[in-house]
Structures are given as structure tokens and as C-alpha cells.
Amino acid sequence: MSATLAPPSTGGAPSGSGAPGAGGRVRAALGHALRSREIAVAVVLVLVVAAATARNDSFLLSGDGWRDLLLTPSILLLLAAGQMLVIVTRSVDLSVGSTMALTAYLTGRLFIDQPGLPIPVVVLAGVAMGALLGVVNGVLVAYAGVPALVITLGTMYVYRGAMLSWAGSDRITADQMPKDFLSLGTSSLVGIPVLTILALLVVAAVGYYLHTARSGRELYAIGSDPDAARLYGLKVPTRVLTAFVLCGALAGLAGVLHAARYGSVSSSVGNGIELQAVGAAVIGGVAIFGGSGTVWGAAIGAVLLVTINRALPILGIPEFWQRAVVGALILGAVVLDRLLAARRARRLDEERED
């Protein structure tokens, strides 16, 4: 989805020709659905699940299979939603894995050092720490004018170094954290893991913000054409800073929930997951050059990425080819995005000539 600040076209029928009938509207809706990147990724996800289930029915049809299918992508889903907010402004945040590690360890330390602290306070502390680390990234990118790739690559190593210095060889285990907190990662509601419900609520909130808030729509405008956004009078640095703060806050929440999900925190938490978050957003149709994409696409991309990693071994595909398939998905998404962008540009040129 491409979004601008201009109100969307109403698509009303020309006078005199009559409104399109129900059949026309259905065909138009079907055509739109077939062109949707989100639906295309969802179809691939269904095919992967179907193929893995046909090979081993416990992949989906057993109680544990259904639970793992929903629960396993939850952490990545949060990171992908935050990454989407940054990518849509034509930036990227490679420090989310290190941020997640720091907030996960902070969560464990608070339960150990302050045993009477309420769980909501610990959760808010983790989110606040993630947001603070996002402020560092956002200020350096938005106001110092340094490319996000360079800044967040640097902070990724700085944050990871701080984590290694803080945690060392220490490992926080489940018996050091409250059972009520750990139940967040194990309990379910009407067959759906609570962690998955929380992740979906966050994705829905991000989607609502992007779709309804003016500042959310401005993120798309900035990503589409930063120079035009400045000429239009948009507060580009403020909006970019906001995107990084939100991304950091979601990485902080992911760290807190990681501690609840696995009941164990060490210095290796989140290693390499930042690339998965970027890959999930790109596979889900978020343009790597900014300006288009939806948080729903990023969420489906995250689910596909995690599910395909679980499904390929069941399908008998060697580990080397498992990584190659994921890489091919990312490359295919980028190539498709470039082809669609070129097609849109060519169509605009033709319309101007007419």
C-alpha cells in the first residue's frame, strides 16, 4: 500500500454511465486482492503450512503444533512491526536485536534485585529502556544527518558490548522470575497463546496509527520523497525520530516478552534477529526504499519467515538450502518491489504524455 497525505480517491462512477453493478464491484475487489502483496504472502504461507502438514500432520493438527505455529513468530512479529515503521521512512534499524537483549536482561535483573516490583512496572521499564535506546538512534539519524545504516550498525555493536559487559557469563533462569510473569509466555486464551494476542494487539495499534493519524501518514510521505516532504513543511526530523523511538519501544517489549517466553536470559539473546526483522518486513511488501507497505504485510512476513524455517526440515530440505530459500524470498521481494515501482513510474509517464 502506498500512502500520501492527499485524501484517497473516491473512485466514483462517471455521471451518465451509471454506478457499476455488484458484479463489477466484486471483480474490482477481486482484482485488487490479487494484486495485494499481503495476500500473495499469505497464500505462500498457507501453501507452506499445507505442504508441511501433508508430510507430518502434527505440524498443524496436534495441540503443540497449532500452539507453536501461533506462538513461535510472536517475538519477531513485534520486531517486524517496529522495523516497518522505520523502513517506511527510508531508514533501517539494525540495533533491535541488541536492544531486545538489554531489555530482556533488565527484566530479569529487576525481578532479582527488586523482588517486590509489580509486573506492569517491570514491563514499562523494559519498554522505556527500548524507547530510550531508540532516541539515541533517532537523534543521530534525524538531526546529525548520518545514514541510518551506519548509525544503527554502530549502536548495534555498542548495545551488544554493553550487554556483554553487564551480563558477562551470567544467566538468568526461570526460578529467578515470578510464575505470574512466566505465565505470559505459556498461557492461552480460547486456544490462542496470550503472547500471540499481545503481539497482534500491538500490530493492530500500529496499523491504526499509520492509517488514521496524520503523523502516521506523514511517515509514508517522508519515505516517498524526503525533499518534497520538507518543501511541504512536514516536520521530517521529528517524524523520523518518532519512528525510531517506536521501533526501540517495540524492541524493548520484545525483550520483556522474550524473558517470559523462554524463562531464561543470557548475553546471546537476540543475536542476528535484526536481520530477520528486516527480512520479514521486506518479504511482507514493505518497500526497502521507503514510502509504501503495511504493518500487516510485515506481520505476515514474520510469520512466513518463522514458519518456513520450521517447515523446511520436515519437508526434507537440507540446512544449506533452508537458508538459501529464505535468502531467495528476500531477493525476490526486493526485485518484485523494484519491478512494481518501475511499472508505476512508466504508467505515470504515459498519463502525463496523454
Image: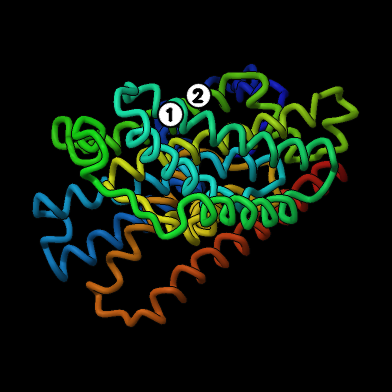
Left or right of 143 on screen, residue 20: left
Q: Amino acid at mark 1?
A: Ala
Q: Amino acid at mark 2?
A: Tyr
The residue closer to the viewer here, 133 or 222, is: 133
Residue at 49 percent across and 36 percent down: it is 250
Residue 264 vertical placement versus 142 (above, below) = below
x, y (%) of residue 290? 69, 45
x, y (%) of residue 165? 54, 54
In space, the residues marked 2 and 1 are separated at their CA atoms by 6 Å
Q: Does residue 117 show up?
A: yes
The tag on residue 204 is 1
SS at circle 1: helix
SS at circle 2: helix
In the rendered view of the protein, which quadrant contains the N terminus? top right
How many C-alpha atoms fall within 10 Å of the one at disc 1: few (<14), some, or many (≥20)?
Answer: some
Q: Which residue is mark 2?
A: 208
Label 2 close to label 1 by CB (< 8 Å): yes
